[in-house]
Image: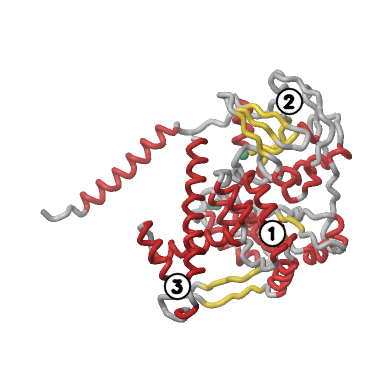
Amino acid sequence: MGDAQQVERAAAAHRLMAIGEYTVRRIAEQTDAHNRWAVDGWEQIAAEISAQLGISRKRASAQMSDGQSLIERLPKLAAVFAAGQVDFRVIAAAIYRTDLIIDTAALASVDAQLAATAPSWNTLSRERVAELVDWMVIEADPDAIRVAAQRDADRHIQVRPGHNGTAEIYGEVRGPDAAVFDTALDELAATVCPNDPRTHKQRRTDALSPLSARATSMACLCGAPDCPAAGTQVSSHPMVINLIAEAATIAGTSTKPGYLPGYGAVPAATVTELANSAALRPVPTADELGVEENYRPSAALTRFIQCRDLTCSFPGCDQPAVGCDIDHSIPYPHGPTHPSNTGLKCRIHHLLKTFCGWTDRQRPDGSIEWTSPRGRTYTTSPAGARFFPQLGIPTETLTLPNSPPPDPNRTLAMPQRHRTRTQDRAYRIDYERAQNRARYEADPPPF
Ligand SMILES: [Zn+2]
Ligand SMILES: [Zn+2]
C-alpha cells in the first residue's frame, strides 16, 4: 500500500511537471500578438493538453498553472514532490496559499522551508496544512502581514433579507470572535432534551434569537409537559477560548502571529489588543516542569501538553485537545507524570491503545512512535511544536521500562455498541427495502 502510494504521488508529480514544462516552453515560443484574442495563447495550450489527457479545458488550465507555479515559484518543493514524498493535497495548498508572495527572496525562503517540512505533513488534515502554510507566509513576507491588517480593518457582519421569509447573515470576523460565537451557539443548542425534533444544525440556528436576547437557554420543542430539559441553562462559567502566542507578541514587540486552534494565525496586532482584556496564563517550558508526584498532571503540565500537542497523536487524527484524554505513554507509576511521558489521545485512539494491541513510545521532544499490533511503526510529531518550535525542545531523556505491565490506574472501559456493525447494515437494508416496497405498492407502475 505504502509503495503504491509513493508511486502514485510520484506519478502525479510527473504528470503535473510535464504539463508545467510544456506550458512554460510553449509560452516562451508565443508572441504577444494574439493576447487579446478570446482564444489566446494560454487557451491554445489548454486545448492541446485537454485533448491529450481527455479532460476539460478548465481542468487543463488549472493543472497548467499548478505546474507552472511549481517550476517557476516553488522549484525546491517540486523536487520533493517529484520524489513521491508529498501528497498532491499538500502541494495544492502550498501553491494556492503562497500565490500572493511577490518578493523573490521571501518566496525562495518559503520554498526552502516547504521543501524541508512538507514531507512530514502528509498525515495532517487539510485545515492544518492550510494553517501551516499561512504561518510560513505571514512570517516570511511583510506584505502578507499588511494583507492581514487590511482584512482585519475590513471586518464586517451584514444581515439582509433572503427569500421566503429567510434572511442571510454573512461577514468576515476576527477568528477569536468567531470561536466565541460558535461555542455560544453550541452551548445554547445543548439546553434542550434529546427528544427535541430539530437537527443539531437547526437548533444552532434557532439559538441565534435567545443568544441575541442574552438568554441562557432555548425552548425545547419535544412537547412533553415533563420535559427533562426544563430549567437547563448554559454553564455560568465564562467561555474559554485559548489563543497561543509568544510573550513578545502579547507585549506588542513582535510581529509573530498568535495561533488559535481551529482557526490558524491571528495577526500580532489583534493578539496585543485582545491581551488587554484576556486572562494571561504563561505556558511553562518542558524543562521548567520536570517530574510530577501525582498520576493526574498539574494545571501547568496540562496547559503545556495541550499547547504542544494541539491534537490527538495518532497518525492522521485531527481531534482537538478539548476532545482528548491526557495519557501516560508508559503507564504511571512505571513511567512518570512528565512532559516526555504524557500526551494527548482522543477516546477512540486511547481505547485502541488500552485494549487492542497498539503501543506507543514517546520521545523527549514530544513526538510519538506508534507500533501497530503487527509491528509496523509510525511516528507523529506534536502539532503545536510546528507553530512554536520552543514547545518541542527536548528535555531530559527518561529511563523507562521496555515492556511495562498494564496500567494500574486504568479507568477506561470499552464502551459497547447497541448493535453490531453487521446487524446495523442488515437493519438499514431491511428498512430501505421496506420503504421502497411500500412506495411501489402504494403506486404501482402501469404495465
Ligand atoms: Zn424536551
Ligand atoms: Zn485520535
Q: Secondary structure at mark 1?
A: helix
Q: Which residue is mark 2?
A: 331
Q: Earlier in the sequence, mark 1 or mark 3?
A: 3
Measuring from the top left, give residue 376's x and y in whole percent: 58, 28
| CA gap, disc 2 and disc 1 | 46 Å
Q: Secondary structure at mark 2?
A: loop
Q: Nearer the viewer, residue 113 or 355?
A: 113
Q: Which residue is mark 3?
A: 41
Q: Secondary structure at mark 3?
A: helix
Q: Nearer the viewer, residue 197 or 429?
A: 429
Q: Earlier in the sequence, mark 3 or mark 2?
A: 3
Estimate how packed mark 1 is, as few (under 14), some (14 to 19) or many (20 or more) residues with alpha carbons within 10 Å: some
Q: Amino acid at mark 3?
A: Gly
Residue 169, relative to residue 423: is it above or below? below
Q: Quadrant of residue 412?
A: top right
Estimate how packed mark 3 is, as few (under 14), some (14 to 19) or many (20 or more) residues with alpha carbons within 10 Å: many
Q: Amino acid at mark 2?
A: Pro
Estimate how packed mark 2 is, as few (under 14), some (14 to 19) or many (20 or more) residues with alpha carbons within 10 Å: many
Q: Is residue 286 left or right of residue 194?
A: right
- Tell me if I can see residue 216 in this picture: no
Q: Nearer the viewer, residue 60 or 164?
A: 60
At 51% from the left and 45% from the top, the residue drawn is 10
Q: Earlier in the sequence, mark 2 or mark 1?
A: 1
Q: Quadrant of residue 96?
A: bottom right
Q: Amino acid at mark 1?
A: Ala
Q: Which residue is mark 1?
A: 108
